Image (cartoon, helix red, strand yellow):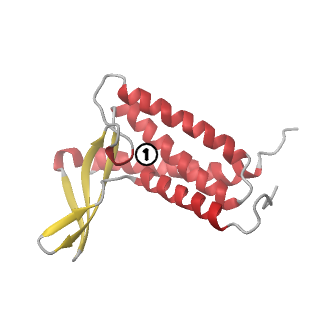
């Protein structure tokens, strides 16, 4: 008889898988159906001062384009780094004490896996969500991102909130 999966895996792995699948489907749709690389940008929402567009960006770096490079092995090194971080986070997930931590780690792992797949397939991450705000004559754009990036950011915010506000650290939520 097999031992049951640890609590953290039962909560976090389905989230990681869901994020990974939805992320890859959204990127497939942007590339193959919408053909965003050919179109460049598609306006979605224009409610002044706020706007939201689909804008094609090939991100060769990490968060906010940091560490971008064009060397032959650069994308492989970044993908391997993401895989190593995901492995560390999976170990943490197995030991998660609360559902919030397990789900947050699932979001980070699923997002990291989605972006690692992009790096290995394309040599860059497919980014396409472009949120912006207009102030007077100028427009301020947030960094163009994707669903994997959003899952990573939400997961990290949830982990920080858990670390700062959990009232009973060390108490396991379930088994």
Position of the N terminus, as image quadrant, is top right
**Is residue 15 depicted above or below 60 in this figure?**
below
Q: Quadrant of the C terminus?
A: bottom right
* Residue 38 percent across, percent down from the top left: 17, 45
| Residue assigned mark 1 | 24
**In terms of image quadrants, where is residue 41?**
bottom left
Question: Is 154 in front, or is 42?
Answer: 154
Task: From the top left corner, tell me how far across and down residue 93 is, in percent.
Answer: 67, 47
Considering depth in this image, is 106 or 37 the residue closer to the camera? 106
Residue at x-position 53% and y-position 55%: 156
Which residue sits at x=57%, y=40%?
A: 86
Q: Residues within 10 Å of mark 1 (few under 14, many from 20)?
A: many
Q: Position of residue 31 (x, y in %)?
A: 29, 45
Is residue 35 something one can see in this rendering? no
Residue 121 at least partly seen: yes
Residue placed farthest to the left in the image? 137
Q: Above or below — where is 12 with respect to 46?
A: above
- Up the image or down, 31 lies above or below 75; here it is below
Give the structural element (helix, strand or loop) at label 1: helix
Please identify the residue farthest to the front as the structure is shown: 164
Whole-percent x, y for residue 141 in the image: 25, 61
């Amino acid at each position: 008889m097999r031992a049951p999966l640890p609590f953290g895996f039962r909560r976090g792995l389905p989230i990681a898988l869901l994020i990974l699948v939805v992320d890859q489907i959204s990127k497939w749709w942007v590339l193959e159906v919408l053909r965003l690389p050919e179109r460049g940008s598609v306006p979605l929402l224009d409610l002044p001062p706020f706007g939201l567009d689909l804008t094609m960006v090939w991100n060769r770096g990490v968060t906010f384009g940091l560490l971008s490079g064009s060397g032959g092995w650069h994308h492989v090194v970044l993908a391997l780094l993401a895989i190593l971080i995901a492995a560390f986070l999976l170990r943490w997930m197995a030991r998660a004490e609360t559902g919030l931590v397990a789900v947050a780690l699932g979001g980070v792992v699923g997002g990291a896996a989605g972006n690692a797949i992009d790096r290995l397939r394309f040599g860059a991450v497919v980014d396409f969500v472009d949120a912006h705000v207009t102030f007077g004559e100028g427009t301020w754009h947030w960094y163009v991102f994707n669903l994997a990036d959003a899952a990573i950011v939400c997961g990290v915010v949830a982990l920080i909130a858990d670390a700062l506000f959990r009232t009973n650290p060390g108490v396991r939520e379930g088994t």
